[in-house]
Image: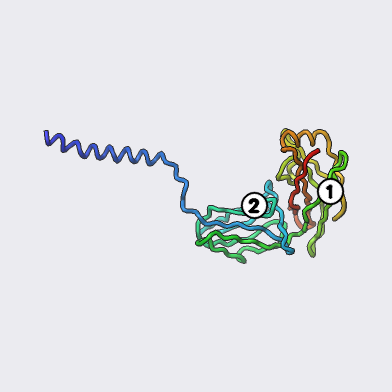
Amino acid sequence: MNAITIKKIPILALMTVYITALTACEETVTDFGFDGQISGMILDQNGNPVSGDASNPAFTVFVLGEEDRVPLELRVNGDGTYANLHLYPQSYNVWVEGPVNGPGQGELVVNLTGAPVEQNITVTPYLVIPQPTANISGGELEVNYEINPSQGYVAEERVVLVSTVAKVGVNTGNGPRWQTRELTLDSNSGTATVELDAELLSMAQERGGGNLHVRIAARSDQTTDWNHSIPIVIEAP
């Protein structure tokens, strides 16, 4: 009887280990220790935010770790911010690509092994576009805008965008659940008048939270990428 009991003990121990292993396999691991954090704003030469286009990767902050071969791409948001809060804690080479002149590869190194880093980056946009102003008069939207080319650049194309989409860009267009109006601008400053048609206003109420999003976009003669103003939000009539 004692011999049988002794043999059972190792078997029970193995079963306990097996059950524990199965339980561990079912757990989802979400913390890999990647707590390196970088965030900040892209600023122009005047200290104002430079807007990005979330729907287009043309304007991007790249971060390349000292032990990495391929950089990560952090898109610049419409308000000029960028961030990644889950990077491996090491030193990173940081640079900017897009319709701007900014730090190139190897010019800015940020160490994320300590506390979270707030790193603003100053660039010179090909075209500096301040945030427009707008007001509704009757069934029309009047947009006051300004486009300031940096030295050596000329505005080749200019448009005002009015959309039910919060992150509107030059490729947003129209769809079954959104509407966008695009008006070509003939000069670098002035007032543009956009007709607020019934379909646009109906979609603004139905899908846009009752709002319209307005921004200016322009492309210089030396690139296919567009510079953007920070969008403004107005209540649809």
> What residue do we see at 12% from left, 36% from top?
3
Residue 157 placement (x, y as % from top left): 82, 52
Whole-percent x, y for residue 87 in the image: 53, 55
Check disc 1 and report the residue beneath it.
Answer: 143
Amino acid at pointer 1: Val
For residue 13, what is the image quadrant? Answer: top left
Residue at the farthest bottom position? 107
208 left or right of 27?
Answer: right
Q: Is tag 1's residue or tag 2's residue first in the polypeptide sequence?
A: 2
Question: Tag 1's secondary structure?
Answer: strand
The way the protein has been coloured in the rendering is: rainbow
Image: 138 above or below 232: above
Which of label 1 and label 2 is nearer to you?
Answer: 1
Residue closest to the eye, 144 or 63: 144
Labels 1 and 2 touching (C-beta < 8 A): no
- From this view, report whether residue 152 is shown above or below residue 219: below
Q: Quarter of the image containing the N terminus? A: top left
Numbered disc total: 2
- Residue at 74 percent of width and 59 percent of height: 125
Mark 1–mark 2 Cα distance, whole angstroms, equals 27 Å
Q: Measured from the top left, where is residue 140 in percent x and y? A: 86, 41
What crowding class fits label 2: few (fewer than 14 Cα within 10 Å), some (14-19), or many (20 or more)?
A: many
Q: Which residue is mark 2?
A: 75
Q: Quadrant of the image for the C terminus?
A: top right
Q: Which of the 4 image quarters holds residue 179?
A: top right
